[in-house]
Image (spheres, grey):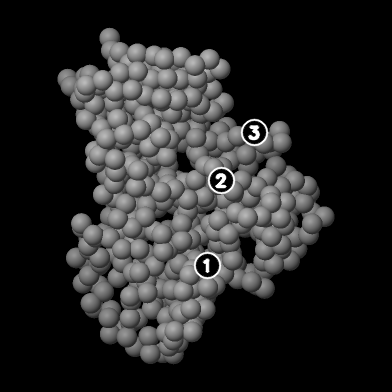
């Protein structure tokens, strides 16, 4: 029987290998790193297992959550009810935002939010306005969308942009408004509790996944790097791999390339020209999203055990004290995501850690240097995350290619707007498996790919029109003129370039 080689052992490659093997096709999985998982995995640093950052499974991650069910590891995730926001100088008082949002929660958020009530109302009207947009065949930056809205105050814009940067890998100027609309629509169209692993992702997700792959007969090899690929006619002809020795292999079966788009581009025009769209992958960009893990010698009092957003944080820090919920921890462990890690690119690791820890201390006055036992800083400058930029959807490749035996997977692949990260990786692995099925097992049932929940733009447009008089009245009450100087100051505070 024709076999399949999957190159790239991240979540996309693992999903492709898992799904193809379930079709009854022999599969081997090759990964350059010592462990599987890619950016969804972990690595051992200073004898500690460190995740690449904080990972969440929103309710709309339908394909990722179904995979968790198939693997039999649902109990490895815990549900989260709240999202907390901490203002400077307010510790230990946190503003609460529930993951299951009701009208009562909305009113509570307006009354006790991190910004004045009028600006908070305009914040929500802005989200309704975004959901009302039809980005079909065109796009704009999220920054341009926000700054073209007549009703938004500088305070409301700053709140929306900071929330966005804190949860993504890019500033609003470099991010797609259509993509952000898609993610907001997914959260709105399929609400539910967010789930998180009960410990590091390797132990609770990637490790069990690998064991299931191997138990199902997938040959897994790590430490094998793809160097080159050659094309002959309408087929991928050879691959050159290195596992200590360099070996040129003929491609007799099918190949799934589940590697980052930058590495895919480096394979050259013979490969990228076979993608659909041709050479589009060369136009895609990734950006670093930093992780800072701070191990303390004691349990820090006053911290909740769920997500905390540091409002106004210069480096867009969000964090979780996973020491309260991960097994084997008796003291605080702050897992922090650094949204604006690019600002620290010119600093040494020690200097960057000092800046970030001092910022944490500004929000958590009970934290001192004496409390800190160990710090792990991962800026990911060499391993950036894919972040959809304005107009990038037209360049994202589909799973099938012009080469009869080549298929593509990765979170950068074509997907509904807003889908990236773990859901994008899993979805692309399923799409690659479906492409293989069509070629090798056309008699087998189609690979099932779940659609994401969404919001009809027409419905949002009707609500936007109905609420427009309210927005106009609230805008007048806010009394914050969008002056040139004020706008420039707000953009400078957000890291923009006015």
Quarter assignment of residue 361: bottom right
Residue 49 drawn above or below residue 222? below
Asked if one can make out residue 268 in the rendered structure from this viewpoint, the answer is yes
Residue labelled with disc 3: 44
Marks 1 and 3 sit apart, C-alpha to C-alpha, by 33 Å
Asked if one can make out residue 450 in the rendered structure from this viewpoint, the answer is no
Residue 110 drawn above or below residue 407? below
Asked if the residues shown at circle 2 and circle 3 are in contact, with their CB atoms under 8 angstroms apart, the answer is: no
Quarter assignment of residue 149: bottom left
- Using the image, tell me which numbered label, if any, was put on residue 495: 1
Q: Residue furthest left?
A: 443
Q: Position of residue 314 (x, y in %)?
A: 59, 66
Marks 2 and 1 sit apart, C-alpha to C-alpha, by 19 Å
Q: Which comes before the other along the chain, label 1 or label 3?
A: 3
- Using the image, tell me which numbered label, if any, was put on residue 139: none
The front one of 359 and 64 is: 359
Q: Residue furthest top?
A: 1
The front one of 103 and 127 is: 127
Q: Residue at x 59, y 48 (%)?
A: 379
Q: Position of residue 336 (x, y in %)?
A: 60, 53
């Amino acid at each position: 029987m024709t076999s399949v080689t999957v190159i790239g052992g991240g979540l996309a490659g693992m999903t492709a290998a898992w799904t193809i093997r379930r079709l009854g096709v022999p599969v081997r999985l090759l990964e350059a790193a010592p462990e599987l998982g890619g950016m969804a995995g972990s690595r051992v640093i200073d004898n500690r297992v460190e995740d690449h950052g904080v990972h969440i499974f929103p309710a709309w991650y339908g394909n990722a959550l179904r995979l968790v069910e198939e693997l039999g590891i649902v109990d490895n995730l815990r549900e989260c009810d709240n999202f907390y926001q901490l203002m400077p100088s307010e510790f230990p008082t946190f503003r609460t935002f529930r993951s299951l949002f009701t009208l009562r929660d909305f009113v509570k958020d307006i009354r006790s939010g991190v910004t004045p009530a009028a600006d908070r109302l305009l914040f929500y009207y802005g989200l309704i306005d975004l959901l009302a947009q039809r980005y079909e065949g065109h796009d704009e930056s999220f920054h341009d969308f926000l700054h073209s809205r007549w009703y938004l105050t500088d305070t409301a814009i700053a709140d929306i942009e900071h929330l966005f940067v804190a949860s993504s890998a890019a500033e609003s100027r470099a991010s797609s408004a259509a993509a952000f609309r898609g993610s907001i629509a997914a959260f709105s169209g399929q609400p539910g509790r967010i789930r998180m692993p009960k410990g590091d992702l390797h132990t609770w997700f990637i490790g069990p996944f690998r064991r299931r792959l191997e138990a199902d007969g997938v040959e897994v090899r790590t430490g094998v790097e793809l160097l080159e690929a050659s094309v002959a006619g309408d087929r991928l002809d050879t691959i050159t791999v290195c596992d200590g020795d360099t070996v040129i292999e003929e491609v007799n079966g099918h190949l799934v390339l589940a590697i980052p788009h930058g590495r895919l581009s480096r394979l050259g025009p013979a490969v990228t020209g076979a993608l659909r769209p041709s050479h589009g992958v060369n136009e895609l960009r990734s950006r670093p999203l930093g992780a800072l893990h701070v191990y303390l010698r004691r349990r820090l009092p006053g911290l909740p055990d769920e997500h905390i957003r540091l409002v106004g944080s210069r480096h867009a820090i969000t964090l979780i004290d996973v020491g309260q919920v991960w097994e084997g921890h008796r003291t605080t462990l702050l897992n922090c995501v650094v949204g604006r890690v690019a600002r620290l690119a010119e600093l040494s690791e020690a200097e960057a850690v000092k800046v970030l820890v001092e910022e944490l201390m500004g929000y958590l006055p009970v934290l001192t240097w004496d409390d800190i036992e160990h710090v792990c800083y991962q800026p990911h400058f060499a391993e950036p995350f894919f972040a959809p930029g304005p107009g990038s959807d037209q360049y994202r490749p589909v799973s099938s290619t012009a080469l009869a035996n080549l298929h593509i997977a990765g979170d950068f692949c074509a997907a509904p707007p807003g889908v990236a990260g773990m859901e994008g990786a899993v979805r692309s692995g399923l799409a690659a498996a479906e492409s293989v099925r069509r070629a090798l097992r056309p008699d087998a049932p189609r690979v099932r790919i779940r659609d994401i929940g969404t919001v009809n733009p027409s419905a949002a447009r009707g609500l936007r029109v109905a609420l427009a008089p309210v927005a106009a009245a609230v805008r007048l009450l806010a009394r914050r003129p969008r002056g040139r100087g004020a706008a420039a100051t707000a953009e400078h505070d957000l890291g923009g370039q006015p």
